[in-house]
Image: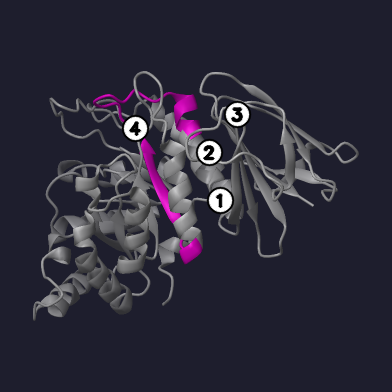
């Protein structure tokens, strides 16, 4: 089956779009200027008219939209109107050039997989260029939420039963004090299953302070983005763009666009970060993850350097190394500083087969000289807290 168009480019998106009353050209220009390329639905009531308005605004601003429509899951596969219902949804939107896909469900229990699979397959058959979008639970969801004994089983069953074109999940690791210790384990599990199924994946990470979660600073935002990239992701989504309505339990506040409708400091930070990511993504989209390694202290569910990767040793603590390869079997390394607060001077000793190493520039995407000594095999770099750099090896 053909790959949906949006899976052919690196996805930069978010929950949630501006609400209905803020759906205007100024707001969508604001989204595009921040470096996003895909818009997910707003928080609140959806309608065909609002979706068409969003699609028109996306077309004017160079964006694509995944639309939310309650009819998508309204009929069961054995309902005589199942196909007719979905045909009506497709007819309302598929003609629009700004359509990227259809939103199906957020965080489904495994009991929903048969319905999601039927809808997903039908939409992919009838509108091959558009993505049926589903977002999974994180690995800290409980058995009742997942509908499976383990998270590994949940992801495996989802891929087998739903047959998605892309896997998405959310994980919020940044507490007021410390970080969730199973964040990397989540990436490990999804990466494993997506490699087996030859599927791209995207991760949703945090911008909005709420409940027990802190207000992410620049290092926090970098850390979430570059750790996701190092695992081979083909997209990053942020929770949230527009600050959700006040909730006394969660106390949402100060997202990318704050509760007053004004861009917060995160807007400027992410505008710069997105520019870098979009440049590096031209290389990232050609790469397949070969291995992911951590230096001590090892996070839960992760692996230390082994004899397989081009990196023999790393003398620095709290480093994440993603090994990737392109179609010509050329090796690449993501090197990420796992520390939130300390810059790191990192020294990698590469294996003797590596003659040269260059850094992929986040400014223009070209290969620039790296500090590499072929005689000793030492590759050196300095990283800000949470920063990552992409290197190519020859």
Mark 4–mark 2 Cα distance, whole angstroms, equals 18 Å
**What percent of the width, then of the height, locates residue 251?**
19, 25
Secondary element type, mark 1 = helix
Residue 221 visible to an observer of this rendering: yes
Q: Which mark is residue 226?
A: 2
The circle on residue 73 is none
Report the magenta residues as a range. Answer: 196-223
Relative to 371, is 272 on the left or the right? left
User: Pointer 3 and pointer 2: residues touching (CB < 8 Å)?
Assistant: no
- Residue hosting label 3: 296
Q: Nearer the viewer, mark 4 or mark 2?
A: 2
The circle drawn on residue 256 is 4
First of labels 4, 3 by sequence position: 4
Q: Is 188 rendered above or below residue 314?
A: below
The CA distance from mark 1 to mark 4 is 22 Å
Badge 1 or badge 4: first in the primary sequence: 4
């Amino acid at each position: 089956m053909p790959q949906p168009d949006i899976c052919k480019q690196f996805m930069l998106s978010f929950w949630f779009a501006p609400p209905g009353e803020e759906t205007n050209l100024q707001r969508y220009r604001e989204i595009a200027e921040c470096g996003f390329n895909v818009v997910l639905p707003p928080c609140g009531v959806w309608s065909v008219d609002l979706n068409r308005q969003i699609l028109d605004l996306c077309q004017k601003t160079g964006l694509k939209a995944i639309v939310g429509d309650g009819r998508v899951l309204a009929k069961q596969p054995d309902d005589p109107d199942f196909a007719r219902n979905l045909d009506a949804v497709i007819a309302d939107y598929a003609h629009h050039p700004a359509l990227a896909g259809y939103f199906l469900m957020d965080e489904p229990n495994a009991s929903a997989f048969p319905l999601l699979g039927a809808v997903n397959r039908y939409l992919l058959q009838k509108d091959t260029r558009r993505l049926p979008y589903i977002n999974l639970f994180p690995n800290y969801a409980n058995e009742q939420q997942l509908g499976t004994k383990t998270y590994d089983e949940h992801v495996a069953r989802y891929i087998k039963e739903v047959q998605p074109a892309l896997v998405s999940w959310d994980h919020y690791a940044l507490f007021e004090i410390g970080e969730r210790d199973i964040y990397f384990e989540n990436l490990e599990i999804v990466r494993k299953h997506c490699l087996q199924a030859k599927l791209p994946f995207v991760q949703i990470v945090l911008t909005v302070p709420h409940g027990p979660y802190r207000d992410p600073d620049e290092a926090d935002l970098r850390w979430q983005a570059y750790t996701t990239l190092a695992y081979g992701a083909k997209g990053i989504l942020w929770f949230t763009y527009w600050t959700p309505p006040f909730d006394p339990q969660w106390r949402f506040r100060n997202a990318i666009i704050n509760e007053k409708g004004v861009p917060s400091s995160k807007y400027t930070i992410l505008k710069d970060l997105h520019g870098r990511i979009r440049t590096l993504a031209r290389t990232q989209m050609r790469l397949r993850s070969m291995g992911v390694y951590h230096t001590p202290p090892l996070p839960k569910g992760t692996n230390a350097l082994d004899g397989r990767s081009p990196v023999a040793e790393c003398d620095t603590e709290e480093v994440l190394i993603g090994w990737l390869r392109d179609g010509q079997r050329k090796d690449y390394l993501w090197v990420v500083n796992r520390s939130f607060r300390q810059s790191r001077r990192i020294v990698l000793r590469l294996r003797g087969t590596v003659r040269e190493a260059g850094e992929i520039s986040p400014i223009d995407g070209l290969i620039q000289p790296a500090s590499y000594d072929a005689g000793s095999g030492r590759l050196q770099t300095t990283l800000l807290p949470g920063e990552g750099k992409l290197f190519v090896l020859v």
